[in-house]
Amino acid sequence: MAALISCEDLWKIYRLGDVEVQALRGVDLLIKEGEFVAIMGASGSGKSTLMNILGCLDRPTKGCYRLQGVDVGGLRADQLAEIRNRRIGFVFQNFNLIPRTSALENVQLPLFYRGLPLRQQRALAAEALARVGLQGRENHYPSQLSGGQQQRVAIARALVASPSLLLADEPTGNLDTQSSLEIMAILDRLNKEQRITIVLVTHETDIAAYAEREVVMKDGRILTDRKTPSGASALPVEA
Amino acid sequence: MPTFLLLTALTAVRILSRNRLRTGLTMLGIVIGVGAVIAMVSIGEGAKAAVAERVASMGTNVILILPGAVTTGGVRGGQGGVVTLTTTDAVELKKRVPLLRETGWARRDVMQIVHGNKNWNGTVNGISPGYLTIRGWSFTGGGPFTQQDLDTAARVAVLGQTAVDNLFEPGEEPVGAIIRINHVPFRVIGTLAPKGQSAQGMDQDDVIFIPFSTAERKVFGTYFLGSVGALFASTERPEDLAPAVGQIREVLRQRHRLQPDQDDDFFIRTQVDIGKVHEDTSETLTVMLFSIASVSLLVGGIGIMNILLVSVTERTKEIGVRMAVGATRRHILIQFLVEAMTLSVFGGCLGILVGILGARATTVVAGWPTIISPETVVAAFVFSVAIGLFFGLYPANKAAWMNPIDALRYE
Ligand SMILES: Nc1ncnc2c1ncn2[C@@H]1O[C@H](COP(=O)(O)OP(=O)(O)OP(=O)(O)O)[C@@H](O)[C@H]1O
Ligand SMILES: [Mg+2]
């Protein structure tokens, strides 16, 4: 199967005055289409930094990142925006919904920027909300929803544009166990049924267990990269 | 793009209506500025139109010649102080200046006039035949003097509206009635359509016209036979006024035997000069009000910029989220520009309303004429849009050039 993500020797260096922080120190990573990858590692090991680069929200200081064969480093800001809009769905730890804006409108946002007619935006957004089990909550504001529900709205927003890649940076980090399980069930189903590639950052092993592959980072490098037990069982699908 | 713009505008309205007080205060500068512009322009245009109307009420293409300073042995007489113009001057001018369509003359004095038991001090004008035509008077009843009236110094009079109002009961027919001017009986043969105030603000209808010959011989008494209070002339076309003035000056200087080093002993004024004085004053007023208006518009614009900068900072995270789901720089730029323009356009519309009400109030309270032209309203609207664009550009640019990840991480 084709490589969706291919990173070669990614570096990210932050300069704060005289101090230099090397958040990524030469990351090589290959993720194929349809994979479900969990990224783990200690706090400060560079997981979020890597995710932001994978999500085209940030650029590496050095190294090459190809998304579906395209070297993202050579793209202009508006081309990156289009990639974020059409190919990538991002789910954040703190949900990042736009406040005082209904669930439906939050989910519509990617389609809004894609320039779809309003009617189509609405229909697709409502459908996406239904897929995460939030039908009937379309007109609720984020402040009227529980954390788990807000995260489901965020997932609906991430998948409404039918991206090929879903990036989730600690999506269950702010949720209780029950909500976490619900979120993971949704992600698992998206990966199994729609073959959406998922890269997920987590600190919890039981969350990581949903993935078929586990990448552990340490000090800006990849420490281990292995198949999980569930990944082993899912191997036949990958072929 | 149209869907995007429409939805962005709706979102802008929603965001702005969330914080009504802040939005209202922000718009205040624009409201006051645009209101001032509208009120000022409508007052200015009203005044200009009123002056134009008054100047026009003088007649068309009128030249006014007044007796002026004579230097006798170094002593300078004031305007009108010395008799220097005569009826013969007028006749000669008509002969020697072909550009003139008509010349006429008048002499005036305030006299006591009596009709029945009514008694009134009015301005009596002894006039030449051409006078009424030059000044553009029209009749509401009766008609003008005949040549025979002039030749025989007939005791006939034509009355202005104010004279009619003061001498006759309402509904009473003036034409044919007998009035006494300085104890001399006159028959009223015509009444004139009202003209209102002159460019100098005098009541032009406070007049009684009698033949010049009659005035000289029977009413005013004569020190100098043939001397007049003023000469009037008119040209066919407005562009003839300037050359005609030059030629009149030549003829009069020659006739009055003035040496090249002597000043004119007369003044020549055209309608254009008289209108100009008033235009100049109303222009000064306009410039003054315009500066006030531009300052408040500037302050209003800066207010919009300020509140938008606050808003951009407050919503940094939102901007990051929008960028994360695919908003381009242009999307963000337009979003904030639309917000700025929504503010300024709403403010502008309110300002237009305030300005119109202000102009109306000025008319009602101060009695000044005001004119609200559609051009002014459209210009004010376009101007508000432009202010929004101009002052929104900096904050919108600031938002658009944020780095997605920095915006997202902003706390
Ligand atoms: N904008 C920034 N400026 C400077 N240093 C940064 C910035 N962002 C991250 N870093 C540094 O880069 C390193 C990696 O940070 P990163 O957020 O990727 O860690 P992480 O693995 O996601 O940690 P956590 O599990 O706590 O979320 C850290 O040392 C952090 O201090
Ligand atoms: Mg992190």
Image: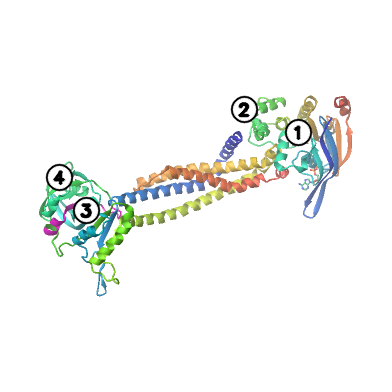
Q: Nearer the viewer, mark 1 or mark 2?
A: 2
Q: CA distance from mark 1 to mark 3?
A: 99 Å
Instruction: Identify the residue at horizontal 73%, vertical 36% (top origin).
Output: A83
Residue type, mark 2 in image? Arg
Q: Is residue B213 magenta?
A: yes
Give coordinates of residue B276: x percent, y percent: 35, 56
Q: Quadrant of ligand 1?
A: top right
Foreground of the two, B33 or B133: B133
Q: Nearer the viewer, mark 1 or mark 3?
A: 3
Q: Return the residue at label 2.
A: A119
Looking at the picture, which amino acid does disc 3 mark?
Tyr
Label 4 sits on residue: B175
- In the rendered image, residue B395, in percent from the top left (x then y), is placed at 62, 47
**Does residue A167 appear left or right of residue B380 in this picture?**
right
The mark that comes first in sequence, 3 or 4, is: 3
State left or right for residue B118 relative to residue B342: left
What subunit carries mark 2? A
Q: Which residue is mark 3?
A: B131
Where is residue B46 drawn, in percent x and y? Answer: 37, 48
Q: Are marks 1 and 3 on the same chain?
A: no
> Which one is in front, B42 or B129?
B129
* Residues beneath discs 2 and 3 located on the same chain: no
Q: In this image, B157 relative to A237: left or right?
A: left
Give the residue type at disc 4: Val
- Give residue A175's mark: 1
